[in-house]
Image (cartoon, helix red, strand yellow):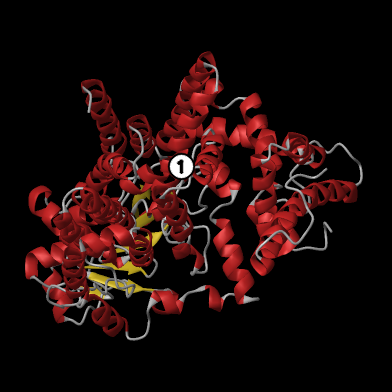
Amino acid sequence: MKKSAIFIFGLIILLAAILRFYKITINPPHLYWDEASIAYNAYSINETGEDEWGESYPVVFKAFGDYKLPFYIYLTALSQKVFGVTDFAVRLPSAAVGVLTVVVMFFLCRQLKMKLPHCLIASLLMAISPWHWQFSRAGFEANLGLFCQIAGLWLFLLSLNKNKWLIIPAFLFFAGAIYSYHGAAITTILLIPLLFLIFRQEIRKTWKQVVLGIILFCLILAGYLPNYLQAAKGRVNLTGENFLQMKGNPIENFTNNYLANFSFDYLFFHGDQDGRHSVKKLGELYLWQLPTVLAGIYFLLRNRTKASTVILIGLLISALPPTVTTISPHALRGLGAVYWWQILSAIGLWFIFRKINPKLRLVAIPVIFYALALYLHVYFIHYPKAYAADWQDGAKQATIFLKKIEKDYENIFVYKDFPAVYLMLYWPIDPKLLQQNNHNTANMGKFTYFDYSNLPRQNIGNKDLLLVPEWFKYDENKLLRQINMYGGDSAYKIYEL
Amino acid sequence: MAGTRPTKFMNFDFSCNIGHIKLDLPHQMWEAISADGNANTLVTRFLHNTPSFYANNLLRCYLSYFSLEFINQAFSFVGLILFLNGLWQLVINKRWKFLLLVLVAPLFPTFDLLENSYLHGFIIYGAISIVMVFGIKRILILVGKLLVGKKVFNFSSKFN
């Protein structure tokens, strides 16, 4: 690789790191409850060697009953060893693998026989991809799954072209993807046979290493499926919430769900309509990528190679995880599509550049900069104010305030809507307490949960506190603190009882 | 036709048009500018201006007619496959006049050029159907080749 290419690649990595780490603990403005749950389980593992439910080094974490996959939680446990139980520690693994994904993307493109400029553009597009950086800036396990899948794919192709033994780490990364996120598990399991089919001739030459890799892969996964099914006791998300449960014709529902992932509105204009998954006002891809993606598809269909087959079928497979559930499109479950779209866009951009007048190429630069500036502006100025509630903003501030004043009070009554995981994490509640009292979060130390059917009464001689949501009516003269979200809207109120 | 189909798919009732954009634009502008708060006025004007909002909304409405969901809902999944295949045939055979026809069709409902929405439907569905014909033709040739091992239908590779 030329020095200039190395320099450009270095700049791309730097840009990726800045976009993923800048103000990472402030925007998104708060840990959402899954991040808090990951952080608490990691803390529990570090403190006791057991998860919050008392299971020793589990393969599947029960958490809220959603049975989280373990890889991200164990990485967070490592991160907490260095940075303590902080918001940064839970977001660090995601941001770090986000930057690494940009790096691996370049090498994957090289193995897909793409030219050097294609590969640099593809990694640049990944670095500035709003879809990817949205999930890199928070503790989303899907981001780790994505990295493992791309790294596995790169090593798989590298093993066919250079060193046969690289198939072993390739399968380790594929297993890592399966242990990270359910969506990544589905796409990885479908991607492996696809690779075997397309590269069957090359694989014949390395069959010993491949067999060894498959055995290792199966051994690693042996603990996964039985544990998952046993822990869930039939409440497997894939079978519990899927398109078959939707009203209407299942085939039609499946088709509509699938096609929704390729909708122009979702990809280029409004994105995922969950406030945690996108800024909602702009698409998952930049609007200027529309012609480049179309040109990329055209180029690959005209120049059919094994690599083009992998790219196009990889894109089609990546839409399956959101398709089989009830909500589609879904940027998080469909995160596996992001790198295929960027590769297509990179190929298309280069193809268009080659066809057009060199002077016209200069037009692309302000267009790309404008789109990036607009996204940065929306993400850093609008987003934290508009969607703070989607990130459960206020729960941390409320818990920290309670912690400051708790010495003077006997009991703290908490309204049922307040997520217990924030009290557990920021107080913090000793994991042993939960493990011993059969995970009874309704009574943790001074905290007692209540609802309208058992409103707390003032005990004579006791000084108690009341933590309630903003809409809850109580004597305003006894208000101690109003907890506001990032944008200034009230989230919680703390009263003296 | 339009109006009798479910409207959960964007723009199935041709409601995404210049008239609706004009009505909605002040709200969109207000939302964006007020979210900026005390940000630099120049930045606000540069990023949230009327031309860019118009262009974005018009493009969104225009492209909705080529959305896979729209075509699937209007012509079924088989129709969608025929459309994609037809589009591919038009591109690789460089049938630019037909392609131009297809690309112009959504301008009528997007800019609300005709008073009757049924005419908009006629133009859109007509344009998509023309593309599908190209798809059907190619598939018939392929099926014929598979069945007999040679061209059974006396089609040339281009329409005469």
**Quadrant of the rendered structure where residue A336 is?**
bottom left
Q: Residue at x 60, y 66 (%)?
A: A255
The x and y percentages for residue A165 are: 14, 57
Q: Nearer the viewer, residue B22 or A117?
A: A117
- Identify the amino acid type marked 1: Leu
- For label 1, the crowd category at 10 Å Cα-Cα, with few meaning under 14, some 14 to 19 and many 20 or more, is many
Q: Is residue A198 above or below residue A65?
A: above
Q: Nearer the viewer, residue A50 or A105?
A: A105
Locate the C terminus of chain A by quadrant: bottom left
Which quadrant of the figure contains the N terminus of chain A?
top left
On the question of residue A331 being in view, the answer is: no
The percent position of residue A303, horizontal first and vertical second, equals: 49, 43
The chain holding disc 1 is A
Residue at 64 percent across and 70 percent down: it is: A252
> In the orientation shown, which residue stands out farthest toward the top?
A359
Image-based side of A333 in relation to A92, left or right: right
Residue B109's place in the image compared with A377, above or below, is below
Left or right placement of residue A166 versus residue B126 in this view: left
**Percent position of residue A223, x then y:** 19, 77
Is A364 left or right of A70, judged from the image as shown? right
Residue in the image at 55% along x and 49% along y: A266
Which quadrant of the view contains residue A50? bottom left
Helix, strand or loop for disc 1 = helix
**Position of A104 compared to B155: left or right?**
left
Per the image, the residue denoted by label 1 is A344
| Front-most of residues A425 and A235 | A235
